[in-house]
């Protein structure tokens, strides 16, 4: 709140600048309560995917060819 410089002493305090008007302490408290609750709900519902994402390299790289079958030998060339 801009009614004092308490935020310099404790960085965890919320800093609000009132740009226009002259809200009462009760009005500021109501706004902060609504915004804090909305933030808490958003934070509670936010989830990150547990699956690792594929990098751009792995998405664009071609698949490796199948390994050579050495049991077939060179006899398939009937030439």
Image (cartoon, rainbow, N blue to C red):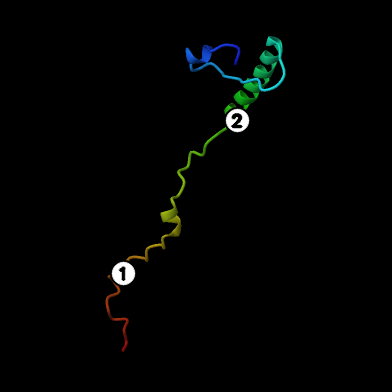
Comparing marks 2 and 1, which lies closer to the viewer?
2
Q: Closer to the camera, 63 or 38?
A: 38
Taking depth in this image into account, of 79 and 48 the one nearest to the observer is 48
Query: In this picture, is 34 found above or below 42?
Result: above
**Label ID, residue 45:** 2
| Left-right relation of 21 to 69 | right
Say which residue appears at 30% left-offset and 74% top-offset: 72
The tally of labels here is 2
For the residues marked 2 and 1, what is the alpha-carbon distance in whole angstroms?
A: 52 Å
Image quadrant where residue 3 sits: top right
Q: Residue at x 52, y 36 (%)?
A: 48
Q: Which residue is mark 1?
A: 69
Say whether marks 2 and 1 touch (CB < 8 Å). Answer: no
Sequence-wise first label, 2 or 1: 2
Looking at the rendered structure, the secondary structure element under dot 1 is loop
| Left/right of residue 22 with respect to residue 73 in the rendered view | right
Which residue is rendered at x = 49% and y = 15% of the image? 8
Q: Residue 10 placed where, x, y %? A: 48, 13
Specify the quadrant that holds the N terminus.
top right
Q: Is residue 72 above or below residue 63?
A: below
- Residue in the image at 65% along x and 20% along y: 18
Binning the other alpha carbons within 10 Å of mark 2 as few (below 14), some (14 to 19) or many (20 upward) gives few
Instruction: Tell me if 73 is positioned left or right of 39 in this view.
Output: left
Residue 34, image x and y in percent?
68, 20
Image position of 48 with respect to 18: above or below: below
């Amino acid at each position: 709140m801009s009614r004092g410089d308490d935020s310099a002493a404790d960085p965890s305090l919320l800093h609000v600048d009132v740009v226009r008007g002259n809200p009462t302490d009760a009005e500021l408290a109501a706004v902060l309560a609504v915004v804090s609750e909305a933030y808490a709900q958003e934070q509670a519902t936010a989830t990150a995917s547990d699956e690792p994402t594929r990098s751009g390299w792995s998405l664009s790289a071609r698949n490796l060819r199948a390994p050579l079958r050495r049991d077939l030998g060179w006899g398939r060339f009937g030439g």
